[in-house]
Image: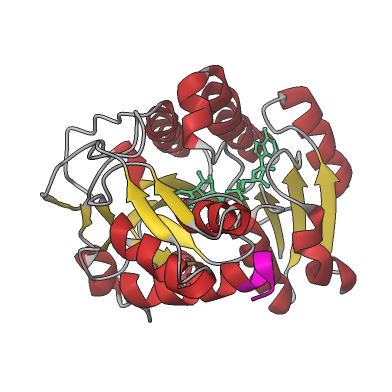
Amino acid sequence: MIHLVTGGAGFIGSHLTRELVKHEHDVIVFDDLSLGNIRYLDDALTGGFCTFMKVNCANLAHFRAAVDQALDGRNAQAIWHFAANSDIPAGIVDPIVDLQHTFMTTFNALQLMKEFNIPEFHFSSSSAIYGDFGHALIDESSGPCLPISNYGAMKLASEGQVCATLEGHGQKASIFRFPNVIGVPATHGVILDFVKKLRADKNCLRVLGDGTQQKAYLHVDDLISGMLFIVEAGQSKINLYNIGPCDDGVTVRFIAETVRDSVAPDAEIIYGCEDRGWVGDVPRFRYATAKLAELGWQPSMSSEAAVHRAVREIAHDICNF
Ligand SMILES: NC(=O)c1ccc[n+]([C@@H]2O[C@H](COP(=O)([O-])OP(=O)(O)OC[C@H]3O[C@@H](n4cnc5c(N)ncnc54)[C@H](O)[C@@H]3O)[C@@H](O)[C@H]2O)c1
């Protein structure tokens, strides 16, 4: 079976690619390397099951030519769409970034699903589509969805485009709504940010916001296992799931202290005054995961355990601690 993976040179896409290759699927990765790194695919590229195409998926003509060349008349089973702008603050400064990299990449991938008669589409959406629900528990039917970042808005539009396309084409789609996903190779995110800051200054860690922001964190190993489970077990045409830990998450204060203890135990942590890190940052969300538990899958790690493990992994990766 041939799987097309957009954004496959990024953090999550490279893990999924490795997992598919391990099961002897043929994988073709499409990535413009704007945020990812081909190094993340080193081991996947050596076994003969994985091909890499450098292409901007927001450019339909280039993307189509790359798919055509890579498939060379063969049929593909699925598109796994991970390509997106993962730098939410960058999309707040310039909304075109999310229009192009988060929405147009999805629109084009769906267009090529139709043109190349690919039966399955698996889409990495985000908790950012919900917007700010305060302390309420958010399940898949919570609404109205009122995103507060351009990234969240373009993910929500992408979900709509997946559903509209599946109405007339393809057999099956997955919409995975991820919380914060952590592990290595980290390309972005709060843990990487804190480790880099403490590497630059071992005495002081400045935190964006007052540290009370509280969210769910999922380790990437659990995420890959959850996505593959949904693809296997989901019986609907559109399989829409929150994938997350079964808890209320951890605070930024907990993460700052965990990173400090691991990287620079003598550092002073200095918090900001706002209840959020930046404009567009949802300060807290509580994620309901009962629907996925009913389907038969639960993560192996809590938010707290995932953060402890990811801090060790990222600190080791970045600083060789
Ligand atoms: N990591 C998280 O916490 C998280 C949470 C929710 C949703 N997601 C979603 O999961 C997916 C993967 O996220 P990630 O954390 O691995 O991010 P990442 O930045 O590591 O990976 C994204 C990849 O897409 C590539 N890319 C970006 N624009 C492209 C374009 N126009 N054409 C081709 N390639 C392009 C980048 O080079 C990168 O390799 C994204 O869609 C992201 O929005 C991630």
Residue at x 20%, y 64% (from the top left corner):
248
| Count of marks placed on residues | 0
Within the magenta stretch, is there residue 260?
no
Q: Position of residue 230 (x, y in %)?
A: 42, 66
Within the magenta stretch, is there residue 317?
yes
From where the camera sits, is residue 313 visible?
yes
Q: What colour scheme does the image use?
A: secondary structure
Q: Nearer the viewer, residue 188 or 154?
A: 188
Outermost left residue? 136
Instruction: Answer above or below: position of 299 versus 102.
Output: below
Q: Nearer the viewer, residue 31 or 51?
A: 31
Q: Nearer the viewer, residue 43 or 93?
A: 93
Instruction: Answer above or below: position of 2 versus 262.
Output: above
Instruction: Answer above or below: position of 140 versus 85.
Output: below
Quarter of the N terminus within the rendering: bottom right
Q: Is residue 170 left or right of residue 58?
A: left
* Ligand number 1: quarter of image: top right
Q: Position of residue 4 (x, y in %)?
A: 69, 52
Residue at x 58%, y 73% (from the top left corner):
313
Image quadrant of residue 258?
bottom left
Outermost bottom residue? 300
- Which stretch is magenta? 316-321
Residue at x 45%, y 24% (from the top left corner):
92
Q: Is residue 74 left or right of residue 166?
A: right
Q: Position of residue 74 (x, y in %)?
A: 81, 52
Quarter of the C terminus within the rendering: bottom right
Instruction: Answer above or below: position of 144 versus 268.
Output: above
Image quadrant of residue 109?
top right
Residue at x 16%, y 44% (from the top left corner):
142
Image quadrant of residue 242?
bottom left
Q: Is residue 51 left or right of residue 205?
A: right
Q: Is residue 4 left or right of residue 202?
A: right
